[in-house]
Image: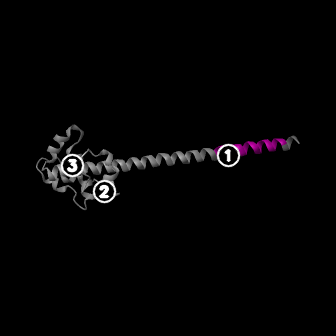
Amino acid sequence: MARQAARRSVFEIQVALRRERADRERRLEALAITVLTALGERDVLVRDAELWTGHALRTMTDDEGLSLREAVDWCGSGITVREITRLLRLDGAHQGGRDGSDELDRPDCEFEADALAGLTVCGGGGRHDAARRTSGMMLRGQSSPR
């Protein structure tokens, strides 16, 4: 009898431990999904903000005729010529090919095209989707990207 009781006790402890491990595994899986979902949402927001910024910079340089350095002057210390060029390339990729490389021919550009050879362009939704999702960032009276 004592032997059976000891076995039953050990069996019950093992069942409880397995249940605790399974519960912990389910909690960790749910937490991992939460983390990855949040990171994915962040990446979409960053991409959309960069597309919107690239469009605004494209308007400054193409429509308003500013050089890259002048755009930096207008935007303040928060952006560099290199960052503007990267954002113009993102905007150009979503406009169907314009990559901002013509900007590199301007005399005020501080670096050579070779320095940009390693840049990559993110994939994803079209420009109108980006404008729709970032509409909260748009200023009153500002139109969405073309």
Name which residue type carries label 2: His
Question: Going by the image, does 47 lie left or right of 112?
Answer: right
Q: Main secondary structure of the magenta part?
A: helix
Residue drawn at (16%, 50%) of the image? 61
Q: Quadrant where the N terminus lies?
A: top right
Name which residue type carries label 3: Leu
Report the magenta residues as a range: 5-21
Relative to the observer, which residue lies in front, 43 or 56?
56
In three-dimensional space, the C-alpha distance between marks 1 and 3, rounded to whole angstroms, equals: 57 Å
Residue position for label 2 = 128
Residue position for label 3 = 57
Question: Going by the image, does 50 lie left or right of 37?
Answer: left
* Residue 124 in picture, x, y percent from top left: 35, 57
CB atoms of marks 2 and 3 within 8 Å: no
Judged by depth in the image, the label closer to the viewer, 1 or 3, is 3
Per the image, is 20 magenta? yes
Give the label on residue 19, or none: 1
Residue drawn at (17%, 44%) of the image? 71
In three-dimensional space, the C-alpha distance between marks 2 and 3, rounded to whole angstroms, equals: 17 Å
Question: Going by the image, does 24 lie left or right of 143?
Answer: right
Q: Which circle's residue, 2 or 3, is located before the other in the chain?
A: 3
In the rendered image, the vertical position of residue 131 relative to residue 79, given as above or below: below
The quarter of the picture where residue 5 lies is top right
Quick one: SS at disc 3? helix
Residue drawn at (59%, 47%) of the image? 26
